[in-house]
């Protein structure tokens, strides 16, 4: 047993660091490190730079233009990227639909969709959740009726992240309403967002941001060749996708960066004439989250090393999701409490557009409350943390 | 980065686990508990026969010089068995201290006897005013003629009543909390002025308070250099801390397994209680806590011999915090999920819970190590 990186892994880390130092745009890194919103154009710009370097698909196999990195390299890459202030990888194209297309798509589909995902040219969004189908996803009602060479799609999706910028949406739709089990009548469709009949309506969340949408489908015509795999087998592909969703969800690198930000803030803020970080109660709260993060990091590495042997993420990823999101939430909570009264002022533009000129109080305080409120979503999305506990109790504990 | 064990390590782990499962059943343990001694010399000899008492002894003194990872694997298995024998005290802490004190004569005399299992050597360091800090020593040894006179009180020394030989820490200089000025003396329990008050502890093990009143020892009783023992004491306790974390993980896995088993078999409202989601989620959380604890036990085993003192202390304190918190969560909930049966002496689960609880209170509890962690982290 050895927790140290090998010489090759250390050399790789140097390579990643050098690349980030030279190529990561300072304005983007500044936003990330200050907790400000990263714009769609920023994501696309960064993906373009990664693509030029050949790192467009860090989690992709080489045959599809990916890096072919193993779990440890991926971990190093994630950690270094987060520390440097690179934007998070938007998962919808690269980490969700792409692995499904690689595993279950035809050669034709792979050729058609994967290059645009890799280069960042095509923006993908997710069409899973519905107003009546959240944790019970398989109860979804969006209907796809076969008419010759097409499906006619009708229904409503919700919690669609950043769909206002999307070129494509991957959708679960019911193709057989009479199937004996509701999981059995679902198909996995790729839909061009420009198709007539699609309407995207914003949902404004409590932090004032427009990140999620409702997507309405009204007689939307989708060619049959846009279906992945077999008709009515979509649930299998959907589960495969969700398994991939959990693997990178520990967010250890980003949480380490946020811990650093928390400490910086707690050193600047004062309480009883001393830096807040020296307050015994606050110091203990910081220590607790730092210790939890240390444990998560090792658990994550154990999962990665198991994954590299088994080649597939297991149900253990649910631990990473639960602990990872709890830690993200706690960090945002502590940062908000650290600034005390200056958690109050709220100017939507400051976090969304990075305009910090007119905010009251220290600049670092401006986005903290909004971020705290925003991150409550993390224990809800991606399979709520209660669903993750169901997964652990059923698939690991066998209850 | 590598989380696999060598073939030898895997064999060691399997051997000890098999020994515990075959020879140290809950019933067997209950029989041992009923004897006046409260531990089994036969079992001790068998552990020695397996080479376990030699594990932490350097090769030149008849030991195996195994590392903390080997010790971790052994402690996982011994934890499952809730051993009443003084393995941690006499086969981990004592040899680790002697090996660090740089005293060839004492090492040559004591270490081979520890390795063979013949002699039980017990480190008597803790005092009543202490809650985990290792530098607090009031017991003092005054120079007198050719030797020393020792006065003081050592409290709740694990397995102190079994000692053939004590390694007593005493101050030969400095103020009560200075790291400088602490020395180690080899003292036999039968020496004049030594009173050993031995008692059972609530986890079924035993401990002793050791009173030293005008205990005269020759200069040769001093182990290592006078006043310079702190680094060795700290180093030995770091090895022991890593080991006790592993013991805790062994217990957590076992108590979780026992709880799952109970929940599957216990029926209420016409179904096994394992079907109730509120209990499933509790057990999922118990599982998560045990996994996080195991991760930190790995970290402790690797970092307890790390040269960088800040990194070493930071990792060990973090590990002890996670183990303490996980132990409390898992232990309390295991009892809760067993309902009334969990309260009884009859099931092993209550015994696991008691040991887990005392582990949190050993070598500094969660609060102590949180403070240590803050100290190291903020100094960095």
Image (spheres, coloured by chain):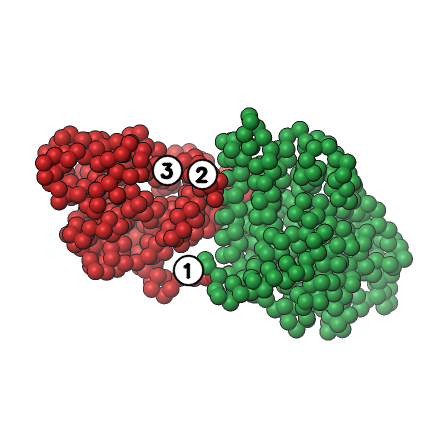
| Front residue of this view, candidates A235 and B91 | B91
- Asked if residue A160 lies left or right of residue A330, the reply is right
According to the picture, the residue beneath numbered tag 2 turns out to be B375
Mark 1 belongs to which subunit? A
According to the picture, the residue beneath numbered tag 3 turns out to be B364
In the rendered image of the structure, the colour used to display chain A is green
Mark 2 Cα-neighbour bin, 10 Å: few <14, some 14–19, many ≥20: some
Name the outermost residue toward the right: A196
User: Where residue A217 sits: x, y (%)?
Assistant: 85, 53
**Marks 3 and 2: which is nearer the front?**
2
User: Where residue B251 sits: x, y (%)?
Assistant: 38, 46
Mark 3 belongs to which subunit? B
Quadrant position of residue B51: bottom left
Mark 3 Cα-neighbour bin, 10 Å: few <14, some 14–19, many ≥20: many
- What residue sits 57% from the left and 51% below the top? A252
- What residue sits 19% from the left and 45% below the top? B223
**Marks 1 and 2: which is nearer the front?**
2
Mark 1 Cα-neighbour bin, 10 Å: few <14, some 14–19, many ≥20: some
| Chain identifier matching the red colour in the rendered picture | B
According to the picture, the residue beneath numbered tag 1 turns out to be A1
User: Where residue B93 sits: x, y (%)?
Assistant: 28, 47
- Asked if residue B350 lies left or right of residue B34, the reply is right
- Look at the image and tell me whether residue B111 can be seen: yes
- Asked if residue B131 lies left or right of residue B4, the reply is left
């Amino acid at each position: 047993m050895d927790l140290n990186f090998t010489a090759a892994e250390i050399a790789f880390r140097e390579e990643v660091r050098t690349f980030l130092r030279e190529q990561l745009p300072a304005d983007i890194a500044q936003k990330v490190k200050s907790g400000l919103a990263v714009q769609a154009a920023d994501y696309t710009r960064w993906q373009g730079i990664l693509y030029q370097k050949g790192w467009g698909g860090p989690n992709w196999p080489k045959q599809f233009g990916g890096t072919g990195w193993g779990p440890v390299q991926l971990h190093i890459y994630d950690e270094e990227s987060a520390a440097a202030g690179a934007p998070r990888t938007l998962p919808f194209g690269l980490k969700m639909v792409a692995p499904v297309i690689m595993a279950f798509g035809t050669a034709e589909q792979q050729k058609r969709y994967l290059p645009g995902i890799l280069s960042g040219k095509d923006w993908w969004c997710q069409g899973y959740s519905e107003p009546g189908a959240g944790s019970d996803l398989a109860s979804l009602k969006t209907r796809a009726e076969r008419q010759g060479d097409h499906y006619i799609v009708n229904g409503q999706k919700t919690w669609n992240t950043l769909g206002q910028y999307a070129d494509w949406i991957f959708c679960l739709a019911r193709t057989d309403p009479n199937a004996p089990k509701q999981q059995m009548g679902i198909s996995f469709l790729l839909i061009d967002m420009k198709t007539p009949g699609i309407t995207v309506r914003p949902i404004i969340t409590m932090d004032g941001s427009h990140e999620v949408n409702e997507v309405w489908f009204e007689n939307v015509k989708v060619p049959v060749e846009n279906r992945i795999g077999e008709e009515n087998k979509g649930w299998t592909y959907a589960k495969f996708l969700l398994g991939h969703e959990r693997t990178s969800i520990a967010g250890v690198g980003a949480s380490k960066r946020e811990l650093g930000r928390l400490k910086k803030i707690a050193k600047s803020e004062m309480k009883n004439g001393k830096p807040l970080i020296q307050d015994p109660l606050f110091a203990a709260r910081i220590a607790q989250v730092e210790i939890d993060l240390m444990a998560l990091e090792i658990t994550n590495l154990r999962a990665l090393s198991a994954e590299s042997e088994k080649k597939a993420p297991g149900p253990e990823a649910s631990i990473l999701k639960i602990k990872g999101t709890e830690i993200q939430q706690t960090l945002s909570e502590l940062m908000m409490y650290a600034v005390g009264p200056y958690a109050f002022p709220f100017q939507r533009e400051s976090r969304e557009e990075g305009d910090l000129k007119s905010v009251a109080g220290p600049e670092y305080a401006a986005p903290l409350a909004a971020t705290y409120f925003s991150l409550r979503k993390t224990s809800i999305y991606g399979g709520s943390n209660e669903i993750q506990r169901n997964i652990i109790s059923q698939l690991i504990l066998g209850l | 980065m590598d989380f696999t064990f060598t073939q030898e390590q895997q064999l060691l782990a399997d051997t000890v686990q098999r020994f515990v499962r075959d020879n140290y059943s809950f019933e067997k343990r209950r029989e041992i508990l009923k004897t006046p001694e409260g531990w089994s010399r036969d079992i001790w000899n068998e552990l020695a026969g397996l080479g376990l008492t030699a594990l932490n002894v350097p090769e030149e003194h008849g030991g195996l010089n195994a590392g903390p990872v080997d010790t971790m694997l052994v402690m996982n298995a011994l934890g499952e068995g809730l051993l009443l024998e003084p393995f941690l005290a006499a086969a981990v802490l004592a040899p680790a201290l002697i090996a660090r004190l740089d005293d060839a004569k004492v090492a040559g005399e004591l270490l081979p006897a520890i390795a063979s299992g013949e002699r039980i050597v017990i480190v008597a360091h803790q005092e009543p005013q202490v809650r985990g800090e290792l530098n607090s020593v009031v017991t003092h040894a005054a120079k007198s003629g050719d030797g020393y006179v020792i006065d003081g009180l050592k409290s709740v020394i694990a397995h102190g009543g079994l000692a053939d030989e004590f390694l007593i820490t005493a101050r030969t200089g400095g103020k009560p909390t200075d790291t400088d000025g602490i020395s180690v003396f080899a003292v036999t329990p039968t020496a004049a002025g030594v009173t050993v008050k031995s008692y059972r502890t609530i986890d079924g093990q035993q401990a002793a308070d050791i009173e030293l009143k005008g205990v005269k020892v020759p200069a040769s009783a001093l182990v290592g250099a006078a006043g310079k023992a702190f680094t060795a004491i700290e180093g030995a306790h770091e090895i022991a801390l890593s080991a006790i974390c592993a013991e805790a993980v062994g217990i957590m896995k076992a108590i979780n397994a026992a709880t799952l088993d109970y929940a599957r078999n216990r029926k209420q409202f016409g179904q096994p209680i394992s079907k109730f989601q509120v209990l499933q989620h509790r057990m999922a959380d118990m599982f998560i806590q045990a996994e996080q604890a195991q991760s930190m036990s790995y970290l402790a085993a690797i970092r307890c011999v790390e040269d960088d003192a800040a990194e070493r202390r930071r990792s060990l304190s973090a590990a002890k915090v996670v183990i303490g918190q996980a132990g409390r969560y898992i232990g309390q909930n295991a009892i809760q999920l067993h309902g009334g049966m969990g309260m009884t002496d009859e099931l092993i689960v209550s015994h696991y819970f008691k040991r887990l609880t005392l582990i949190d209170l050993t070598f500094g509890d969660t609060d102590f190590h949180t403070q240590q962690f803050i100290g190291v982290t903020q100094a960095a």
